[in-house]
Image (cartoon, grey):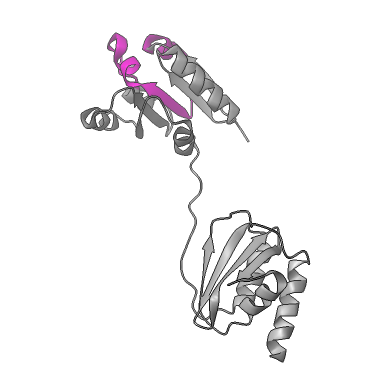
Amino acid sequence: MEKKTILLVDPDPESTMTLFAALVKAGFSVTDTPRSDYALDIIAKRSFHVGIVDVLASKSGDVDLIPLLRSSWTNPLIIAMADFNALAVKKAVIGRGANHFINKPVDVKHLLSLISPKPQKFSGQIEGVDILEYLQFMLLTGSRTIVRLESPESPACLLFLEGGNVVHATSGAVEGEQALFECLRLSGGSFTNLPWNEPPRRTISKPGEFMLLEAARIRDEG
């Protein structure tokens, strides 16, 4: 894929060095300049996907870069930044065409999330699903997650899923395969997917599909 191109306009050399290094490391193609008149020469020759512009640099030399970039490029992402925080300034730069306003020193992680936001995902509830079927689906996706099961019949269960396998399970004080089978014998309740955390130990080493088949056999016999 073509690298996303970024024009960075910042008169502060220390800030420029930090942002330039972080953006290049993240895989972007970056052109930097400290002045708006230099930026004019650059944008006369090429366009960019993203403009990151210091508010003071934008207004220097009687050139307001933000609306100029907005009109010169095709659907650009424009991020204005300043080393002071004022609601009036934020409203002004947004009104002139910036998509976002951030404070300096810039939080690099936040900046990267604005440039390349993670795709949105769905969340919700599923009624009447068999937990074995749901777990089989999760194992097929190879998801790295923790499934929490809650039921009046049992203490809360935690199932640690990674790479198509259940690597650890707990049911109250019980762990490992026994805990997994106890959890999957529950007749009803609710389940929630939790963010992944490394389990305190890995108590299950057998393949995930084998464990589900064994759990189904035990449930049928019971």
Q: Depth check: give the residue in front, 97 or 17.
A: 17
> Residue 38: horizontal and vertical position, in percent?
42, 10
Residue 9 image point, x, y percent: 42, 18
Q: Is residue 34 above or below residue 154?
A: above
Determine whether, in the image, residue 161 is placed left or right of residue 190.
right
Residue at (67% x, 71% y) in the render: 136
**From this viewpoint, which residue is outermost toward the front?**
173
Tell whether position 177 is magenta.
no
Q: Quadrant of the N terminus?
A: top right
Q: Is residue 49 above or below residue 7?
A: below
**Closer to the camera in the image, 222 or 51:** 222
Q: Nearer the viewer, residue 144 or 89?
A: 144
In this orientation, does residue 47 appear?
no
Residue at the location (45% across, 20% down)? Answer: 8
Based on the picture, tell me whether residue 52 belongs to the magenta stretch: yes
The residue at 47%/62% (across/down) is 123
Tell me if I can see residue 134 in this picture: yes
Res 69 → quadrant = top left
Q: Residue furthest bottom?
A: 221
In which quadrant will I find the C terminus? bottom right
- Which percent across, then down, holds residue 84? 29, 24
Give the magenta-colored segment's residue range: 36-65
